[in-house]
Amino acid sequence: MKRDIITNKFVIKFANVNGTGSASANKLFSRAIFRMGIPISPKNIFPSNIQGLPTWYEVRVNENGFLGRRGGIDIMVAMNPQSMARDINEVEKGGYFVYDSTKPLPKEMLRDDIDLIGIPLTEKCREMYDDPRQRQLFRNIMYVGTLAALFDMELDVFRQLIADQFKGKQKLIAPNVLAVETGYNLAKELHDCPIAYRIERRDNVGNKILIDGNEACGLGAVYGGATVSAWYPITPSTSVIDNFARYCRKFRMDPETGDKNFAIVQAEDELAAIGMVIGASWNGSRAFTATSGPGLSLMNEFLGLAYFAEIPSVLIDVQRSGPSTGMPTRTQQSDVLAAAYASHGDTKHICLYPSTPKECFEYTAQAFDLAERFQTPVMVMSDLDLGMNDNMSEPFEWDDNKKYDRGKVYTEEDLENMTERFGRYLDVDGDGVTYRTYPGTHPTKGAFFTRGTSKDEYAIYTEIGEKYIENMDRLQRKWRTASQYVPKPVIRKTDKPCTVGVIHYGTSEASTIEALHHLNSLHGISLDSMGIQAFPFSDEVGQFIEEHEYVFVVEQNRDAQMRTLLINEYDFDPECLVPLLHYDGSPITARFIRHEIRDWILQTTTSPRRRSRFY
Amino acid sequence: MSYKIPAFRHPNLPKNELGYTSKDYEGAVSTLCAGCGHDSISNAIIEACFDMSIPPHRVAKLSGIGCSSKTPTYFLGNSHGFNSVHGRMPSVATGANMANRDLLYIGVSGDGDTASIGMGQFVHAVRRNVNMVYICENNGVYGLTKGQDSATTDIGSTSKKGEPNALEPIDLCAIALQLGATFVANSFSGDKDQLVPIIQSAIAHQGFAFINVISPCVTFNNTPGSTKAYDYIRQHMASTNTVDYVPLAEEITANYDEGTDERVTMHDGSKIHLHKMESKHDVHSRTSALTMMQEYKAQEKVLTGILFIDEDSNEIHSTMHTTKTPLRELAEDKLCPGLDALEIINELHR
């Protein structure tokens, strides 16, 4: 097959068996490309299982910096016989299928429109290693070496990465390097190297970093001054707390006493986790929890209390595919409504929608300021794709002059000088935000009774209708104030006047931006876009929708939850918001978005009202 | 509705060491039914705190939902209070305790709140040994929803509804003992002489101090057929010991009898003086406590007093090695690693 040479632009997918150590080999491969200055976007596609089931690792390599999933596979590295039949069919026409040729490929699997590259990895490992575990581990490293030869990559980059990885475990460096070199030489010996896809050094990653969103959230909580964390293990949020703990052990141990300047409690369930967060926040600490959909459901009652009794609380929701247990190791943006309106009665909560690790870091830190400023729950709405995959990101920044915004809290001195009666829910500034006191502040002033029942300005229980309404309306006033403090939407306008827009949020960003780029270059369609960063919506969100005849809302759930939220919060004609929905549990692809928008626009001659298939 | 208590008090009200009168420990007027056992418990808490000269504002009082959970409004009006959600007071108290280890935490709950909806949180607060006083005001009935049996209602006990309860009751003291609670007591709201020093001992205890207080519900469960009625408890109550709480500064003047008296020195140096009514019982033995409870139950008696104490217990902060400074007092300098550290982290991810 005669092919054009394609440099630094392809999608490679690794098919492995989980629990065999393939993850670190795959990571080694993607890091090497990143080190060679080429943007990458790796995605883990893994089962809810410890050992033995199929798992995949898909890497988008794109020197232009498109980081969303593209769709389609150019090279499949098939190391799992269980899934091989399906894997080979996934390869795009003209692609490559790399497999372990110790056993021949079953005839019925053969395809003549792709190149088959067989490498006898298992056989080679049996020859080189006696220990079965070593055979398994080094087989993985060996196929990385094979790929290095196929793509014509610099072996020194691998040597350096292995040396960095095993710093302090010197003994492991040489055998790993040997395995890479063995795989490299095998490929050179048995096949024409390089193939049509190539990796060439570039300088296209600048000072960017490669990090997962959960680590960014955990670190953001450290920088944001969280001292108490309470949580219950749940995929895919667990590593938020693991990382918080790891960075606390690094930065929060008292150098003199060895004591901890933090407390992490593994709770008995999510109800207790959020209860502890509320207790700690009520008592003046910055506290947070991390969870996923099922945990958020359990926390509903408490979130209503925190809203109504006005207690700061920070929750990081790493969303996964629901409903119920759903697909716990697959991604989705399907907690949008459950988070925004969590709990019974009239409630609504500040939500932040990060798209990148940098935003995970910043929004988590900022969540504590917002929670304390507005004395209310704040939810950082990440997802599995962002949280558990390495994402290329701008480096994290911090201003050392920044002071935490602890919100309106009366100190002992304030209370001492106070002549009027302290009213916990008295709106003295007119912005809906009232002053609170921490327990134990002043011997005779400032104590109040926190309750989930209706109360007057002085926190005294009341069932008088007017008082109840006054309080609920003040909460609404506070909500409006909050809409001016939360992160503004990111609006990208085209050069030309444009009547159609696209809304995205969270992890739909990268694929949307790429789709818009190609819609323009391939089809001459140019669209304005807006990335929603927070709920409550700031004025700019409504303005953007108003400025366009209709707007696509790209999201990763079945029910168009953000669209519903927009319709509910504004009084737009629902038909001017066109849902664009991806919900199979895999991260949304640029190709999907491009095709959907292209088809819609090219086939729609009148208003979108005519098209009813989405409703 | 909460009413303000009239401001007038006798001008010569006695003062405690801090110069406070008992008035400074009172709360709003109770809205519970006249004769409710819970009000006696509120008064016992007031008396215990006044006697121990605890600064009222250094107490945080927390509760769940139910008649019992309303009571924190009726005592310690100068303390911050938190009426949380049903059965979830233990988690809120645990979180509050994490934020500031220096306050005294008094949790008030009931049998519905503790033994049913909140059982999960109760048992985990016990096993964490959260440093707090946990009082379960146990009346064997749901009051606010008008008289359903609770999980602590004894078999055969008959409330106002007239149906004898058919299900096995949950014994909260036994469960607390089995889960490793480091202070367990059983008492009766009608026996202030016993209850006040038990509360004081619980306050002096470092760790989770559980007090189950049988507290009759005059409206729904004070019937002749109820095992949690005033008459029944008065006729069937037996004590393992009488308790005197002796603050650090005071000398013990009472006679000490080697055979029947025991003194326990608490973490803060104060002492508990136990006069044993039941000579077989060893207050430092869980097995003994559980056996005695069973024996008395078999005789249809309710054993009260301090059942178990481990005065050297490690409360949650000491097992977690948290800093001695309350976490909430730490500021940016201790909490935020700053830009330099962040740049190193960035570099590690390139």
Image (cartoon, rainbow, N blue to C red):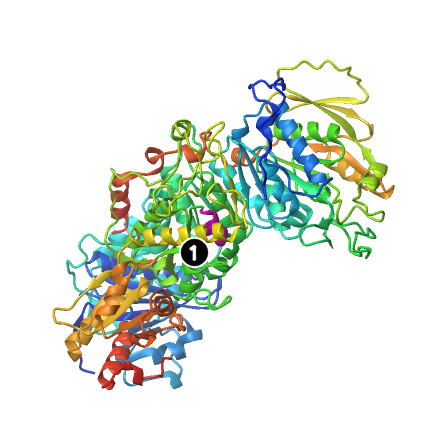
Left or right of A221 on screen, residue A196: left
- Where residue B27 appears, x then y in whole percent? 59, 34
What residue is at 22 percent from the left and 84 percent from the top? Answer: A602
Residue A330 appears anywhere in the view: yes
Toward which corner of the image does residue B47 lie, by quadrant? top right
The residue closer to the viewer here, A289 or A352, is: A352
Magenta part of the protein: which range?
A304-310
Query: Which structural element holds mark 1?
Result: loop
Point out the residue furthest to the right here: B299
Q: Residue A575 in magenta? A: no
Relative to residue B304, is residue A495 depicted above or below? below
Q: Quadrant of the N terminus of chain A?
A: bottom left
- Where residue A414 appears, x then y in whole percent? 38, 30
Relative to residue A169, is residue B325 depicted above or below? above
- Where residue A528 appears, x then y in whole percent? 20, 69
The residue closer to the viewer here, A244 or B76, is: B76
**Mark 1 crowd level (few <14, some 14–19, many ≥20, 10 Å Cα):** many
Q: Amino acid at mark 1?
A: Ser
Q: Quadrant of the C terminus of chain A?
A: bottom left
Relative to residue A265, is residue B206 depicted above or below? above
The residue closer to the viewer here, A422 or A133, is: A422
- Where residue A479 appears, x then y in whole percent? 37, 53
Left or right of B4 on screen, residue A419: left
What secondary structure predominates along the stretch shown in magenta? helix
The residue closer to the viewer here, A293 or A80, is: A293
What residue is at 15 percent from the left and 78 percent from the top? Answer: A524
Q: Which residue is mark 1?
A: A237
Of all chains, the one bearing label 1 is A
